[in-house]
Amino acid sequence: MPTKPNTKALKGLIVRLGQEPDLLQAYSNSPKEVMLGAGVPSKQIDTIMSGSKREIENLLGNAYFVSHIISTTKT
Amino acid sequence: MGKGSIVIVSTGMLIGGDITVRCQETIKQADVVFSLMSSAVGDSWLDELNPNHKSLQYLYGKTKHRMDTYEEMVEVMMQEVRKGKKVCGAFYGHAGVFAWAPHEAIRVAKKEGFEAKMLPGVSADMALFADLGIDPATKGVQAFEATQFLFYKHQINPVSHVILWQIGLIGEHSAKSFDIPEKGPQILVDYLSQWYPLDHSIALYECAVLPIFETRIEKIKLGDLVNVDLNLITTMVIEPLGELEPNEKILGKFGITEKMVGSRD
Ligand SMILES: C[S@@+](CC[C@H](N)C(=O)[O-])C[C@H]1O[C@@H](n2cnc3c(N)ncnc32)[C@H](O)[C@@H]1O
């Protein structure tokens, strides 16, 4: 089994992008530079830059999230 | 140790950015935080806010009845409340919107004599109003759980916007599966065609919970619903059809005509 990559820097950056409009603007203009500045490893930067939603979700560990559903049709 | 308590907080849609100040402070100050986030990024964010954070995600099972899962969520949180802890349950979106377990946790805690409350937040429909430019005041809004709408005799008011939640599980009756029954969308389209023409405009909405992704706003014709991807996070919106019809009887009781409503003359 391959070891899970440490995505702490990437996840920390994504949270900040949701909180700081200026940073988000900088990221929209030059995502690579912003990720490098936040200490995101280059392999992870490549995954993000690939734009493949599936690969990005895998990297972040979102693939098996079903917690979107917390309600049933009838209770 | 003091008497236990529970506060259910809402973390909003966009992870990190949508949370209210009091929800965030409640997370920080709790003895223990349990959560259901919409992304693993949300989990690591909560880990930073409070090291005593645990996700409830592990309670889901592929063929497990969802009510069992939800009851276990309530029980896991309540065990800590009974130990005298200050418990926080953090749920994505608005914790009380289309979410049984958070409401139940409050009911159980209160019944057992503990302090319990829920704090509101930004839900999927609140984000939708912003992203799709809908004001519920214009013509009204109806909202239904999509499968419940099919299985029970709800009445549509086509003049208003209609929001169907959990469209990605349309027709899923067992509460044990996360797969959409193949015929679900077609049955929905057929059923809706008693109110709308097949070329009526609908929108599929998936707001980005991470700022690195795009929000999906896909406008299609009702009849094309059978050809598109529906996911667990998809919300469907039906555009209004027709104009508001004046209620002459009530207007008469006020001694006015419809022309006088909001008139500048
Ligand atoms: C169990 S409900 C939970 C709703 C959540 N408590 C809220 O406040 O929005 C799940 C449903 O919410 C809607 N939903 C959840 N995430 C969404 C998203 N990112 N975009 C649009 N709708 C979403 C979908 O209709 C989905 O099937």
Image: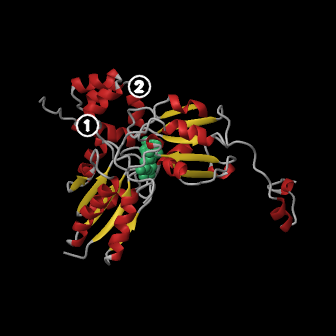
Q: Identify the residue shown where x is 64% and y is 39%.
A: B193
- Looking at the rendered image, the disc whose residue lies closer to the viewer, 1 or 2, is 1
Quadrant of the frame with the N terminus of chain B: bottom left
Distance CA(mark 1)–CA(mark 2): 26 Å
Of all residues shown, which one is farthest toward the bottom? B113
Instruction: Measuring from the top left, give residue B20's x and y in whole percent.
Output: 41, 55
**Amino acid under disc 1:** Gly
Return the disc, 1 or 2, that comes first in the chain's sequence. 2
Q: Is residue A27 above or below residue B238?
A: above
**Amino acid under disc 2:** Asn
Q: Identify the residue shown where x is 29% and y is 71%.
A: B5
Quadrant of the frame with the C terminus of chain B: bottom right
Q: What is the quadrant of residue A14 in the picture?
A: top left
Instruction: Measuring from the top left, give residue B78's x and y in whole percent.
Output: 26, 67
Subunit that carries the residue with mark 2: A
Q: Secondary structure at mark 1?
A: loop
